[in-house]
Image (cartoon, rainbow, N blue to C red):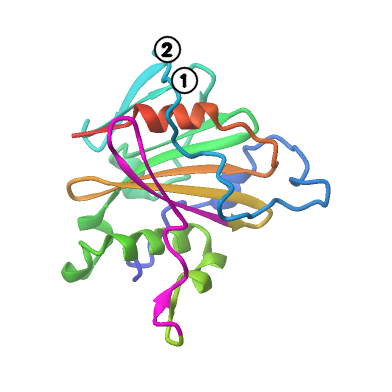
Amino acid sequence: MRFNSKKILVIMLAVLLMLPVMGAGSSGGKVKLDLDDYHAKNSSTTIGTSGTERSIADGDITFRIPDSMTRVDDTEIFNKHISDEKDGEMYLDGNALFGIFYFDNDYFVDVPEEKDETNAIERAIISNICPSEEKRLKWNSLTLRHYFYPTSQSKSLAGLNFHHYVGKYENFRVEFAFTPTDKGICVILFIYNHDGTKADAAISVMESLRIK
């Protein structure tokens, strides 16, 4: 599945240049990619009440951004449709980037019969943002299955179900979290290049997420 040759993040390297130079992950100079080792995964922790209430998708998706996060200029980062509709936001979170956007199935998916194939759409979003993951997510004719996807699942305190996946772009770790909406998908990104990265703020946003 492809999205009309549309890039979701137009300039991925520009996104990564926003991150402070932290060294490349572990002492071996590489970011670990243990599939079950998620930094940004919702949990049963208590959610703080401080922060700024935000919304995308015409108010159908709401969330609270902690005061520790700093909004970055994302006008030339997201796809023009996402940017024009104000359906995506990007934040600097310490030595990581946190992104959230609404993926409109009607706009991005051409084939009507594919608009409800949530898992296939999520795999295509991952490959669109991290092209090197495409091979792992393709259909395997020998095993008659895709690469294990999602690699993890969770449920927020509000009852939202998330699919999780961790990929790699250059020497950066890119964690994905997906939760469905009425006609699309809310996508969360957590991008970093250091194994000691903290994700408390990112988890707080995920736990504050509400979808109408």
Residue at numbered disc 2: 50
Is residue 71 something one can see in this rendering? no
Residue 7 screen position, x and y as percent: 42, 58
Name of the residue lying farthest toward the front: 44
Name the secondary structure under disc 2: loop
Residue at numbered disc 1: 66
Callout 2: few (<14), some (14-19), or many (20+) C-alpha neighbours within 10 Å? few
Image side of residue 69 versus residue 56, left or right = right
Above or below residue 150? Residue 206 is above
Segment tinted magenta in the rendering: 143-167
Image side of residue 46 versus residue 96, left or right = left
- Mark 1 or mark 2, earlier in chain: 2
Callout 1: few (<14), some (14-19), or many (20+) C-alpha neighbours within 10 Å? some
Residue type, label 2:
Ser
Do tag 1 and tag 2 residues touch (Cβ < 8 Å)? Answer: yes
Name the quadrant of the C terminus. top left
Name of the residue lying farthest toward the top: 50
Residue 25 screen position, x and y as percent: 74, 45
Q: Nearer the viewer, residue 162 or 181?
A: 162
Q: How many marks overall?
A: 2
Residue located 44% across and 33% down the image: 43
Tell me where residue 87 sits by quadrant: top left
Name the quadrant of the N terminus. bottom left
Name of the residue lying farthest toward the right: 27
Task: Say whether residue 160 is magenta.
Answer: yes
Q: Nearer the viewer, residue 57 or 197?
A: 197
Is residue 53 something one can see in this rendering? yes
Name the secondary structure under disc 1: loop
